[in-house]
């Protein structure tokens, strides 16, 4: 193994994402051969890395796993937190150290992918790759055809990351009922769908993510997980590689 940055090494061990690894390093919770690691450090063959005192080893290909979870409302998209509202309660039974691919806000429900494959997670979350995510949205007033077309064309919303107003990327919308519609995004701004609806005077009542790329929620019950395997996993990996 060539020397690699410590945050990438931790990600390849299936412990967390590179960003979360940076936070652990900054907190002094990572060591290399007994020495507290710095964010710019690299790891070479034969060196021992520990995270929170536990040895970290790169996971072999056969041990890389991907799961689909139907996240309930009221659960945050982190593994754990002091209030016990994190995803660890669902992941614990697998016996694996998994982490979520991207985010789904606490007030929303539906599909979340969990994996110990850092490279795959990075590929799915990589900005600008056009990876589709589909949602079912219900709002507090009857949605008009004019407003559905406005959502599809793009609306101005506040972008917390840049602290300014931005126009959303064109998307696809389809009416389901008077108050409900589906929306397919290739963008992932903070609370994007809620902000898009608010820009047109609607409040979101329920928001459910039903698809990430080729992975669908289907009949998965709230709080249930299933492993992604076979052709479904092959297609997911192929899509990530083709955009890599």
Image: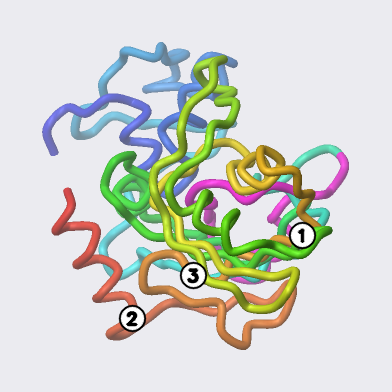
Using residue 143 as the reference point, say whether residue 18 is left or right of it: left
Is residue 8 placed above or below 208 in the rendered structure? Answer: above
Give the mark nearest the N terminus, 1 or 2: 1
Using residue 220 as the reference point, say whether residue 4 is left or right of it: left
Q: In the rendered structure, find residue 139 and report the number of the disc placed on it.
A: 1
Report how far apart the C-alphas of labels 1 and 3 lie in the structure. 20 Å
Residue 13 rendering spot, x and y as whole percentages: 38, 46
Which residue occupies 75% across, 43% down?
201
Report how far apart the C-alphas of labels 3 and 2 lie in the structure. 13 Å
Q: Is residue 127 visible?
A: yes
Disc 1 crowd, CA 10 A, few/some/many (<14, 14-19, 20+): many
Q: Label 2: which residue?
A: 232
From the viewer's side, name the closer residue of 82 and 126.
Answer: 126
Give the mark nearest the N terminus, 3 or 2: 3
- Kindly state the secondary structure of the residue where label 2 is placed: helix
Picture quarter containing residue 143? bottom right
- Asked if the stretch drawn in magenta spans residue 105, the answer is yes
Choose mark 1 or mark 2, whichever is in front. Answer: 1
Residue 139 rendering spot, x and y as whole percentages: 77, 60
Q: Which residues are magenta?
A: 83-106
Residue 46 rendering spot, x and y as whole percentages: 23, 33
Which residue occupies 61% across, 48% down?
193
Which residue occupies 55% across, 79% down?
226
Choose mark 1 or mark 3, whichever is in front. Answer: 1
Q: Label 3: which residue?
A: 211
């Amino acid at each position: 193994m060539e020397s690699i940055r410590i945050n990438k090494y931790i990600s390849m061990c299936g412990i967390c994402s590179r960003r979360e690894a940076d936070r652990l390093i900054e907190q002094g919770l990572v060591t290399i051969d007994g020495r507290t690691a710095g964010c710019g450090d690299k790891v070479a063959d034969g060196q021992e890395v520990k995270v929170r005192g536990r040895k970290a080893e790169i996971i072999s290909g056969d041990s890389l796993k991907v799961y689909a979870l139907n996240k309930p409302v009221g659960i945050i998209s982190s593994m754990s937190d002091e209030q016990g509202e994190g995803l660890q309660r669902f992941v614990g039974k697998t016996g694996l150290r998994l982490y979520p691919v991207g985010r789904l806000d606490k007030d929303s429900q539906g599909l979340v992918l969990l994996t110990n494959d850092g490279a795959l997670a990075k590929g799915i979350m990589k900005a600008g790759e056009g990876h589709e995510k589909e949602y079912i949205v219900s709002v507090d007033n009857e949605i008009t055809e004019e407003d559905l077309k406005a959502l599809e064309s793009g609306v101005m919303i506040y972008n917390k990351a840049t602290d300014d107003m931005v126009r959303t990327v064109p998307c696809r919308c389809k009416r389901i009922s008077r108050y409900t519609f589906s929306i397919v995004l290739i963008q992932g701004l903070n609370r994007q769908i809620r902000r898009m609806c608010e820009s047109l005077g609607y409040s979101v009542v329920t928001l459910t993510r039903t698809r990430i790329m080729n992975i669908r929620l289907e009949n998965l019950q709230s709080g249930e997980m299933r492993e992604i395997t076979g052709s479904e996993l092959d297609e997911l990996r192929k899509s990530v590689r083709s955009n890599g």
